[in-house]
Amino acid sequence: MSIVVFYKLLAIIVVVALGWVIGKSRWLNQGQAAGGDATRTLSNAALYIFIPALLFRTTARIEFGSLPWNTLAAFFGPVLLMLLLIYAWQRRWNRTARLPVAAPSVRAISASFGNTVQVGIPLAAALFGEAGLAIHITIVSLHALVLLTVLTALVELDLARERRLQHSGETRLLGTLATTARNTLIHPVVLPVLCGLAWNASDWPLPAVIDEILQTLGQAVVPVCLVVIGMSLATHGVRDSAKGAVVISALKLLVLPALVLAVGHWGLGLSGVPLSVVVMAAALPAGSNALIFSQRYQTLEAEVTAAVVFSTVAFAVTAPLWLGVLSALP
């Protein structure tokens, strides 16, 4: 692993540790009313201000005509497959486990959504140069758009179905679908994506001042989310969530890149830099957006926090492993 990537991992751990200190000392709770939750306030700021700005700017600027669709299929095909398999597995298991309704979607995002920016960009730049970084940036531009939109639709469908069961004792298909569609579209993740795509389709350039504002807001996503992870860690700890977090980390760091490797190399015939980029993108540790998602639905926050921390630390071991596998391919 290059020294640049090591420093990025170290920076992530230090910022999370800073969040933990802030959470333990309750500095941000000073002056709040009794019961105030600074962690959730910061999380909501990320979800309702910073992440929408980043998503709108990204989708408004994507050049769809120049995207390497075969390479993107090698990444997003297996990632979506694993996401849906975990969701289906957890939904079936959830019938007896009696976890919150949103648990299957939360575990699915934790095991599939990687840290493609803070760790992924320096990794791609250091290992694969300009050509590899271009491919990785393309993945980044679609990463949140695809995964968060799919998962939002799934969790809102489950919540709508649950509300129907509680109020009428039965699920009415049209009512459930209408509620799901409304809550999916009017959502702090999906709505800015749709607005960004609409702006993209208009071929209008973003005004310079608007672009600068969106860029400034979007730059806050990573540090704010990392601080939230640390504060959540201080609040919830990891002792009761370690088992689930270890399973999620193993799925994210080992199973997902293996699936991408199999589909990309033997299924779609990728090799060289494109194959290496998509495999290493899949091998990245769990991203902080998974925690923001779990806090949005107030589900398994401790487990997701632990999974982000565990997978980030373990990535220092699994990354060289996958680089070794890639170098051994013909």
Image: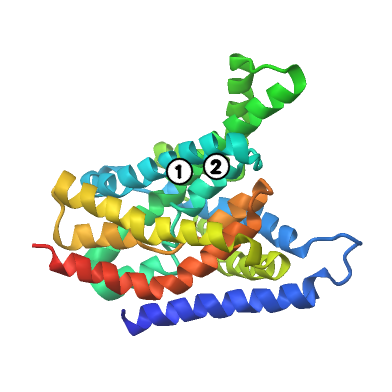
Q: Is residue 202 above or below residue 274?
A: above
Q: In this view, does 253 lie above or below 318?
A: above
Expressed as whole percent of the image width and height from the top left, the position of residue 24 reads 75, 75
Tell me if residue 262 can be seen. Answer: yes
Expressed as whole percent of the image width and height from the top left, the position of residue 51 reads 57, 54
Q: Which label was assigned to residue 86? A: 1
Q: Residue at point 56% right, 80% down?
A: 14
Expressed as whole percent of the image width and height from the top left, the position of residue 236 reads 70, 64
Q: Residue at point 14% right, 68% down?
A: 328
The one of 93 and 44 positioned closer to us in this rendering: 93
Q: Which label was assigned to residue 104? A: 2
Farthest-out residue, left: 330
Which amino acid type is shown beneath numbered disc 2? Pro
Q: Is 72 left or right of 90, judged from the image as shown?
A: left
Measured in 3D between alpha carbons, the distance from the residue under mark 1 to the one under mark 2, in whole angstroms, is: 7 Å
Check whether the beta carbons of the residues at disc 1 and disc 2 lie within 8 A of each other.
Answer: yes
Q: Is 207 left or right of 276, judged from the image as shown?
A: right
Which amino acid type is shown beneath numbered disc 1? Ile
Expressed as whole percent of the image width and height from the top left, the position of residue 158 reads 60, 32
Mark 2 crowdedness (10 Å alpha carbons): few <14, some 14-19, many ≥20: many
Tell me if residue 215 can be seen. Answer: no
Q: Which of marks 1 and 2 is nearer the N terminus?
A: 1
